[in-house]
Image (spheres, rainbow, N blue to C red):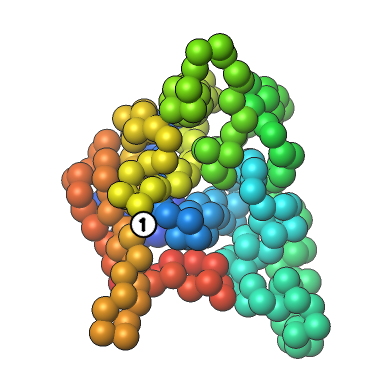
Amino acid sequence: QGEMAGQSTGIDAIDIHTGGMRPSELWVVGAKTSGGKSILMLQMAAKMIEQGKKVVIFSLELGVEEVYARVLSTLKHISMAELMNPKTMTKGTLTKIQSAVTTLRDQNFAICDMGGLTMDQITAHCIRLSETSGLDLVIIDYLQMVTAQRIKGQNREQEVAGISRQCKQLAKRLKCPVLTATQLNEAGQSRESRSIEHDADNVLMIDHWSKNDQEGTTETFWKCRNGERGKSFNAKMNGEFQKFTFI
C-alpha cells in the first residue's frame, strides 16, 4: 500500500535506501573514537520515541542523564551545551525544556546505564520488557563495551564475535530491530572482530573528512541487506543539537 516495509529511522535518505528498520534485523553503526556513533543511533531512536514506539537503550558508556539530554536535544532542537550547563540557560530555553520533558515523560521508552552488563543480562531485560509491554527497538551502545563471559582458551576476538552473534539472535527472538555500534581501528575495520560485519544485516560506516577548510562526514553502507552495498551519503554532524543533517 505504498508504506515502508520497516520502521522509519527518521532520516529520509536512509529510509529510502533501506526501506526502514525491519523486524529481526541487526543494524551496526561503525566509526572511530568520538566519530558520532551515539549521536546517529540516538537520532534514529528519537524518531521512534516521538512516535510512541517502545524503545530500550542500553547505554554502557554514557549515564542516563546524558542520554536523556541527547534525546531532548535532537528531538526538540535544544542546545546540548545549555542542557549540560544550566548556568548558560536562558529563560526561553528553560520553558522549551520543561515542555519537552513533559512530552517525553509520557513516551514509552527506557534507559539502562548499568555497567558491566553481559548479553545474557541484556537479553533477560529485553525479554521481560517484550512480554510486559512489547518492544519496537533495542539499542546497545556500544558492542565492545558489553562484558563477555570468560571461556578458557578464548581470545578477545572470539569473545566479541560471540557478543555479535548474540545480538543477531536477540533481534530474531524479539522480532524487532537491534541497533548497536562498533568502534573502528585506524584501518577503518571493526576493532577486535570482523564477525560484527558478517552478523549484521546493515552496516553503516561514518567517515569524517576535511578539505579546503570545510569539514563533513560520509555515511557509507558497507553492507545493506535490502539495498545497494557501497551507497554513500554526505552529512554534517551538528554536535550542538546532537544530530546529522544529510545533504
Q: Amino acid at mark 1?
A: Ile
| Left or right, 239 with reference to 220 | right
> Foreground: 81 or 225?
81
> Foreground: 240 or 77?
240
Task: Note whether residue 186 is visible.
Answer: yes
Q: Circle 1: is it few (<14), some (14-19), or many (20+) Cα within 10 Å?
A: many
Q: Residue at x 75, y 83 (%)?
A: 89
- Residue 202 rendering spot, x and y as whole percentages: 34, 40
Residue 201, quarter of the rendered image: top left
Q: Residue at x 41, y 53 (%)?
A: 31
Q: Secondary structure at mark 1?
A: strand
Task: Note whether residue 40 is visible.
Answer: no
- Residue 198 rendering spot, x and y as whole percentages: 32, 30
Residue 120, quarter of the rendered image: top right
Q: Residue at x 40, y 59 (%)?
A: 11
Residue 210, quarter of the rendered image: bottom left
Q: Quadrant of the N terminus?
A: top left
Q: Is residue 21 above or below residue 44?
A: above
| Left or right, 31 with reference to 138 | left
- Residue 94 rendering spot, x and y as whole percentages: 77, 79
> Foreground: 206 or 152?
152
Count all numbered tags in the image, as a single digit.
Answer: 1
Q: Quadrant of the C terminus?
A: bottom left
User: Farthest residue toward the top?
Assistant: 152
Q: Dot 1 corresponds to which residue?
A: 206
| Left or right, 91 with reference to 228 | right
- Residue 4 rendering spot, x and y as whole percentages: 35, 46
Q: Residue at x 42, y 41 (%)?
A: 191
